[in-house]
Image: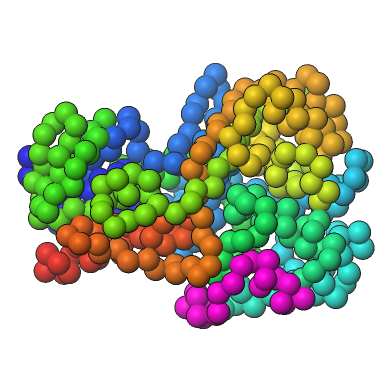
Amino acid sequence: MNADVVVIGAGLAGLAAARELSIHGIHVTVLEASNHVGGRVRTDHIDGITMDHGFQVYNPSYPEAARVLDHEALDLHPLTAGLGVRLKPGKLSRLGDPRKNFLSSLGGLGLATGSPLAKAKFANYALQSSRSSIADLEARPDMTAREALISAGVTGDLLATVIQPFLTGVFLESSLETSRHFLDLVLRSFVQGTPSLPAMGMQAIPEQLHQALPTGTVRLNTAVEKVNNKSVTTKDDGRVNAKLVIVATDPTVAATLIPGISAPKGRSVTTWYHLADTAAQALAFGESLLLIDGQRSGPVINTVVLTHAVPSYANHGQVLISSSTLGVDTSLEAQTAVLSHLARIYGASTRKWEQVGVYPIPYALPAMVPPFNTRQPIEIGHVLVAGDHRDTASIQGAMVSGRRAAQRARELLEIR
């Protein structure tokens, strides 16, 4: 079998690369080892319940994704803008929509979450990030997110009870050792757009990219064992010849296929799904507000009532809750600790909540520690590389890396 370009991996990066190449008339074959497209972006539909593998959301403000995807067809449902912070049992404070007035929304959290001065300094830092170009943000001296926030005057209770617990759920690490370059990009998107979910689950995003490709472009259940100069060797089908090869797998697989690539440390997470017997309007103000525990009194790093935003995620009248914990512990003790913590966060009994799904994900995100370059090399030896480990650990980063690899492939093939 022959192709102009072989793309290994049908995740977001691989599909984005294949789309860009196909638009320019280049014959592409995408080889995917699993039985589905999407890579880490995957959704299960079980007994009328929609469960994404990991708490993943899509921000319509992502410029690359917005350029490529049909938002109307995805039927996006926004989560409630803002944040809910549990300070103690029975007290849930609320940060409002930061796009309207960031400072006043922070003030709504009350004095227990930090001084007015610290909140003003964080509001200024976030607004500066939202109003700066991506190039300007990436030109800032790099340091850890913690160092950047402290140097900006974001300290004390605000950092400990709001910012650090919230960013733990974003970075999947609790010490804020992630690069400030990624922090700034996160704050920029947080202010500019509202995280949303497609009506049919997050896998609708890679499925849309897949459907835009010529029929037969993607070959599922086809594992690649070796990458050669102008061909790849698959486990079952032998050799596939190509003028160029793009490796768009996760970084651990890429490291086995390409000499010289080392996989960055991975961040792990477990996502839990529960059906609640509690009246929907009694939970989280009756809204799809992301909740965190400002006291960090248990394993849950964030939780949200999904059906407040997307009723189609469960059967009519059912209340579906998604919660996340660091690591991949799904033991009975962990299940008990999660339910106990959720009871404190929501201020409701969870004794009759039904666990309907649990997804441990050992490598949910590549770590992004300083010094961090959002534009990692994509040309290594005789192959091109794409994936969120070449850019930022996000949907935006994965799709940008795919386009970058495709554009370089066109240059090498001398196709404009």
Note whether 127 is above or below 78 in the view shown.
Answer: below
Q: Quadrant of the N terminus?
A: top left
Q: Quadrant of the C terminus?
A: bottom left
111 in magenta: no
Give residue 268's position: percent from left, percent from top: 55, 43
Front-lying residue, 78 or 384? 384
Give residue 398's position: percent from left, percent from top: 40, 55
In the image, which residues are magenta?
133-153
Left or right, 403 with reference to 194: left
Q: Quadrant of residue 59?
A: bottom right
Q: Residue at x 50, y 26 (%)?
A: 45
Left or right, 20 with reference to 368: left
Q: Residue at x 83, y 48 (%)?
A: 295
Left or right, 413 with reference to 118: left
- Residue 20 shows in this picture: no
Q: Main secondary structure of the magenta part?
A: helix
Left or right, 237 with reference to 55: left
Q: Residue at x 61, y 61 (%)?
A: 177
Give residue 310's position: percent from left, percent from top: 61, 38
Front-lying residue, 256 or 36? 256
- Residue 234 shows in this picture: yes
